[in-house]
Amino acid sequence: QPSPIEDKNLVDIKKKVIDESADIGLAFDGDGDRVYLIDEKGEAVNATVMTAMIAKRMLDRNPGAKILYNVNVGWIVPETIKKMGGIPQITKVGHSLIKAQMRKEDGLFAGEHSGHYYFKDLYYADSGMLASLIVLELMSEDGRELSEIVKEYDIYSLSGEINIEVADPLKKIEEIKVKYSDGKISELDGLSVEYSDWRFILRPSNTEPLLRLNVEAKTKELMEKKRDELLDIIRA
């Protein structure tokens, strides 16, 4: 299926990149507004890393600009924006909400964990093609392999989005909120809880009895431990 956020749909392109000794693979969705990168080793590049790469590129040319990212995007994005002298702005998930906020706040660029990338100069629309061209330009000027460039940004461990079917999503979120009440809590979009070395975002689906979980940590071991801990509570 043309849904690049799911790893099972990237099997063919990963193999093709290796078989062809290609420098990069571009996995688009059906209408081309989303894209995932495959590096020269056949590994997928997560959308948080790609958002950080493009944000740095945009800020190189537009110092001090405002860059938006949704609640599921990882720590490296606001860190990169601040390091480059830009203004990071978190948003809710969803293209209509992001486009409206970009217009309201004069945002230059926005990235989502799902592989959507939005550009002020493209009427605030999302374009996987334009995002790909920016990455190709970056690679051409940098001269390093994509995996080497990615290494600078891929410093935290991300679980990716995990969907869990539950009978009452809102009740379960409230239970989780009480359990992790010692963390820094945000309810901008679902439930976000942050600690010094890990965090998670739990959001209900708008259309199905599902919860969507994303976990991030400073080490893979901690991410896996906390991911499994949360899954046990959610499924209980």
Image: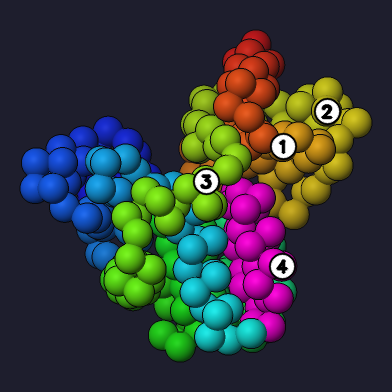
Tell me if 37 is positioned left or right of 68 in this view: left
Residue corresponding to mark 4: 82
Q: Which of labels 3 and 1 is toward the front? A: 3
Q: Specify whether residue 69 is painted magenta.
A: yes
Q: CA distance from mark 3 to mark 2?
A: 27 Å
Residue 181 found in image quarter: top right
- Observer-nearest of 20 and 217: 20
Mark before the other along the chain sequence, 3 or 4? 4
Q: CA distance from mark 3 to mark 1?
A: 16 Å
Mark before the other along the chain sequence, 3 or 1? 3
Residue 227 found in image quarter: top right
**Circle 1 — which element?**
strand
Residue at x 65% of width, y 72% of height: 84
Q: CA distance from mark 1 to mark 4?
A: 20 Å
Mark before the other along the chain sequence, 2 or 1? 2
Tell me if 222 is positioned left or right of 131 in this view: right
- Residue 154's disc is 3
CA neighbours of label 4 inside 10 A, class few (<14), some (14 to 19), many (20+): some
Residue at x 26% of width, y 41% of height: 41
- Residues in magenta? 64-86
Amino acid type of disc 2? Tyr
Mark before the other along the chain sequence, 1 or 4? 4
| Residue lying furthest left | 20
Residue corresponding to mark 1: 199
CB under 8 Å between discs 3 and 2: no
Amino acid type of disc 3? Asp
CB under 8 Å between discs 4 and 2: no
